[in-house]
Every structure is written in structure tokens, then in C-alpha cells.
Amino acid sequence: MRRRATARVKAATALAAAAALGAAGLGACSGGDDKPVGVAKVVSTLGPGEGALNLLTLPGSVESGGTDPRVDWVTPFQERTGCKIGLKVVKTPEEMADLMRDRGRRYDGVAAPPEVAGRLVEENQAVPINPDLVDGYKKLEPRLRKLLERDGKHYGLPYVWGSNLLMYDTRAVQAPTSWAALFDPGQARRHSGKIVMRDSPLAIAEAALYLKGRQRKLKIRDPYSLTPAQLSAAGRVLAEQRRYVGEYWDLPADAVSAFAAAGPCSARPGPTTRTC
């Protein structure tokens, strides 16, 4: 008889916030001029609505009821404002970044994950915004408000923390107590070939977070802002870990599938195990 696997997720830390970035080109529901990237000025007042808003997003960031009719944030917004939402849902952060770099794009905003948001700002693919025009902005945690601030200008609105999690099957793995379960060679070796990691620059921050407590002489304060020496140390951790990683994932669904597919019935004990 097949029994359902019991798994727990351990929240290690809240690492980053996704951000809503304003893209140059269209003012959409808030009004604005059609100007190239880096030229559009910060608006001082809200103009008349234009009736449409084109957004670029990853799955799960802007739900319109298409995936689950019970989860629909778009329809109430459209009914309340009269502003029609056009959604372009991409599969990966890289696809999102490539579309934003397309000079022929027509997006008003992008719900960008951390590994994309900073690059879009640095590449001048996003325009500054006026946070004073956003209700509730000053109620956000100050650290969140500063995440996308460059030279005194704001380029995005953080709207959610992204928690970084360790997931494991309680029937097969003793509860991890730290990131060492993934990054310490001695511990990772126990589950060689059964560890699943995401293929993302955010993995560097995960390794740096591990080093923050393990090698205090590195003086890591912010895993997202590393010195050359700190970055090199994190790179060495990931290089050492690679021999023990069974799969790298791009999409969250791939990580879920990898976790669900392993188990004693396939003779693969380890952190990605299920019980049969």
C-alpha cells in the first residue's frame, strides 16, 4: 500500500524580496509619455488612466484565475479600476530578462525576482518611479524600501519576502539544523547524488549565508553584497558541493518533481526521499 510521504520545510531565513519594476515605454493606467529606457522622467502626479496595463511576470506572481479559479487577483483589480491587464507569463528569470532587453517590447511593468531586478536597473532597462504616489509605501520596512534605490532614485516597489527553504523527508532524513546539511562536504557526502539545488545566482547567496556562520573571518554581513574574497569563497563552496548534487532546477515545479520522484521504491535514500 502506497503511503503519502511526509515532508517538512525548514525556513532558514528570509533572503530577498521580489520587486515590481516600472519599464520605460508606456504609462498605461497611470498615464505617462512614450520615452526610451533611461529617458523617461519620474512623474510628479498621476495622470488620467489609459485603460490598459501590460505586465511581465513569472508563474505565481500575478494570478488571473487561469491556473486556479480560486486564485484571481487580476479580475477584482480590473473591476475596481476599469484598467485592463495584459499578462505575459514567462517560465524562467532569464527569459524575463531577455524580453525586457528587447527594444520592441511593450511592457509597463515587470514583477522581477531578485536575480533579475538588479540587472535590469544596472542595464537601464527600468525607469525611476515616484514612491510618494504609492499608497502605503512609507509603511514598508525601511530595509525593503532601499533594496532598489540607486543614487537617490527608486526603481521598484518590493512587495514580498522570498523565504529560502530546506526541504526534506522526515521518514528518511534527520532534521537539518543549518545550511551545512547542503554545503558542508562531510554532510553533503551522505546524500551524494540526492541533493537538488536551483540553477540560479541566488545559490551564491545561499553559500555565502552558510559561510557567514562557518567562516566568521570572512566578515560576511550581507550575502547579496560580497567582496571579491567573499565571492571567491562562496564559489569554492558551490564547486565542492557540485559533486554531490543530483539535479539542478530552473523551475520550482522541477524541484517538486525531483523531490516527489525519489524514494526507497527506487532505491534512492536521501534528502529527496519519499516513503512507499
Image (cartoon, helix red, strand yellow):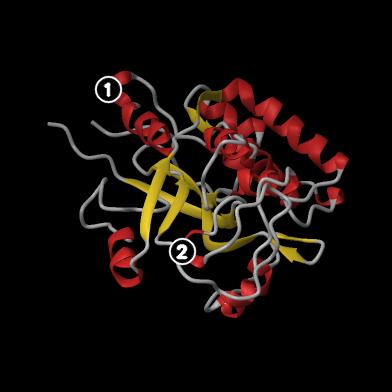
Say few, some or many: other residues with alpha carbon within 10 Å of mark 2 (under 14 / 14 to 19 / 20 or more).
many
Pick the quarter of the image with the N terminus: top left
Local packing at callout 1 (Cα closer than 10 Å; few below 14, some 14-19, many 20+) is few
Numbered badge on residue 177:
none
Q: Position of residue 248 (x, y in %)?
A: 52, 27
Instruction: Using the image as rendered, state which of residue 176 and residue 21 is in the foreground.
Output: 21
Question: Height in image: 32 above or below 219?
Answer: below
Residue matched to label 2? 29
**Identity of the amino acid at label 2?**
Cys
Q: Which numbered disc, 1 or 2, marks the residue closer to the eye?
A: 2
Pointer 1 and pointer 2: residues touching (CB < 8 Å)?
no
* Amino acid type, residue under disc 1 in the picture: Cys
Residue 141, image x, y percentages: 62, 74
Coordinates of residue 241 in the picture (x, y in percent): 64, 28
Question: What's the residue at 63%, 49% (across, down)?
Answer: 117
Residue 54 spot, x, y in % from top left: 45, 50
At 75% from the left and 55% from the top, the residue drawn is: 222
Q: Residue at x 40, y 27 (%)?
A: 269
Residue that badge 1 annotates? 265
- Quadrant containing the C terminus is top left
> Which residue is at 65% across, 64% downward?
129
In the figure, is residue 74 to the left or right of 230? left
Q: Secondary structure at mark 2?
A: helix
Left or right of 231, for residue 49: left
* Towards the viewer: 235 or 170: 235
